[in-house]
Image: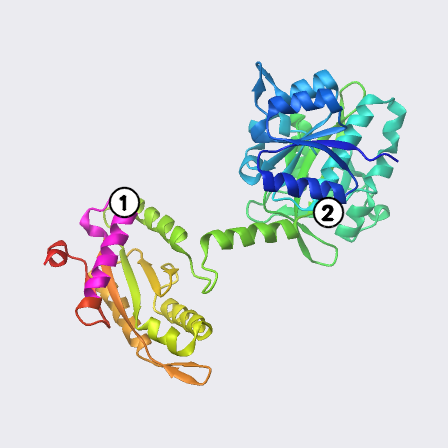
Amino acid sequence: MVSPKILVVEDEKLLAVDIRNSLNRLGYTVSEITNSGEEAIKKVAEIHPNLVLIDICLSGEFNGVKVAEIIQNNFHIPVLYLTDYSEYKNLHQYYHLREPFSYVLKPFIEKDLHIAVEMALYKHHIKSTSEQEKYSLLAILNHMGSAVVVTDTYGRVQLMNSVAEIITGLRKEEVSGKYIQEVLNIVDKDSGETIANLIFQVMETGTTLPLPDKFTLITKNGGEIPIADNISPVRDEYGNITGTVLVFQDVTERRQIEAQLTRNAFYDGLTALPNRILFLDRLRQALERCKRRLNFHFAVLFLDLDGFKGINDRFGHGMGDDFLVAIARRLESCIRSGDTVARFGGDEFAILLEDIKDVSDATNVAKRIRESLSLPLQLNGYKILTTASIGIALSGNGYEEAGALLRDADSAMYRAKEIGKDGYIIFDPELMES
């Protein structure tokens, strides 16, 4: 059997190579890789692939007509879009992403890619063949990696594939003819949205709806599985809606990848504290609240450990890392749950104290930090002592930018270090100039 030929249209070289390798492992043939919509049209005319996988950013207009429309209408070749999560959040803005299995989310796992390609090829196939061949759908569904549940116009289950049986822990015989809300416990715990509500919305509007981000399936044995995909209307040959098809899959792995990407972007890998990026974002939010609420005050503490280089030199970087982790935990113990302590790198930390009454709240935290650090740390059989120099900047000085407030707290910290370390200084422009 000849493997389907696929044209990949992607301008990120590394991603394009990853896609090609994945497709090859899945048994497809990547005929070409190109990085523009115009070039894609030329390649389609030359090699006539079975499917075009195109990054949505490259699917703009060519001579006033969208690239995908040219490929689909002129060459009768299916198009599958590659899109990132921010575009997925706004699918309703893209008419070409409303149909199920018309896109693949980045970062993808091979199972998602395989399902989307197979369904895109199959949808194209059934549009091109006789009506009788549509009855082979059930056989296809049972070999998909996604769960599929079909309902009638009353929301009663008519069909469920084997993947749905595995994920839910239910058998087709148990659910057939029953209302979907009675047999499938699928709900968004935050909003209270249920699967039955969405099914009737789909039939009322006649459009495909993506499942909400936090939709969770409660399995027969009580387990909770995050799921994603969509619900689409099912139509007869006259265009009348005869029910819906719910397609979903276990996205635990995808959510773990997304969570890891978030942690990498906003949290320090060593101490698990917020990093500079997340701290500055929270600081900007505090500035905005300060502008809206006259009685809202906050403070920034910038902290640098005294003598950390000596600890690293004496005990080694491994012990130095353990030391920084222990310091991070002590700093967390000195603040309230709504405040933020972040690591900026090396031995520099920053603290955001929100909704304080006056400067005494900030100085009291600085004193607690000094007291906490005065207790020796027990690490690998050694007692290690350290102190810290702390600079404090207060919100009441007319700041407009987060960077300026952080800069002044940093300046105050260096002044504290210059005059003897193990202390704190409140930023004062006149003092800094003296």
Q: Which amino acid does label 1 sit on?
A: Glu
Secondary structure character of the magenta stretch overall: helix
Q: Which of marks 2 and 1 is in front?
A: 1
- For the point 90% across and 25% down, the residue is 132
303 is higher (above) or lower (below) than 38? below
What SS does tag 1 mark? loop
| Residue topped by disc 2 | 184
Q: Which residue of the protein is positioned furthest toward the top in this rendering?
A: 63
Instruction: Indicate the quadrant where residue 102 lies.
Output: top right
Q: Is residue 397 magenta?
A: yes
Q: Is residue 354 magenta?
A: no
- For the point 79% across and 51% down, the residue is 166
Per the rendered image, the range of residues in magenta is 395-416
352 is higher (above) or lower (below) than 121? below
104 is higher (above) or lower (below) than 402? above
Q: Does residue 66 appear left or right of residue 332 in this picture?
A: right
Across and down, in percent, residue 201 comes to 64, 32
| Residue topped by disc 1 | 401
Across and down, in percent, residue 266 comes to 45, 53
CA gap, disc 2 and disc 1: 50 Å
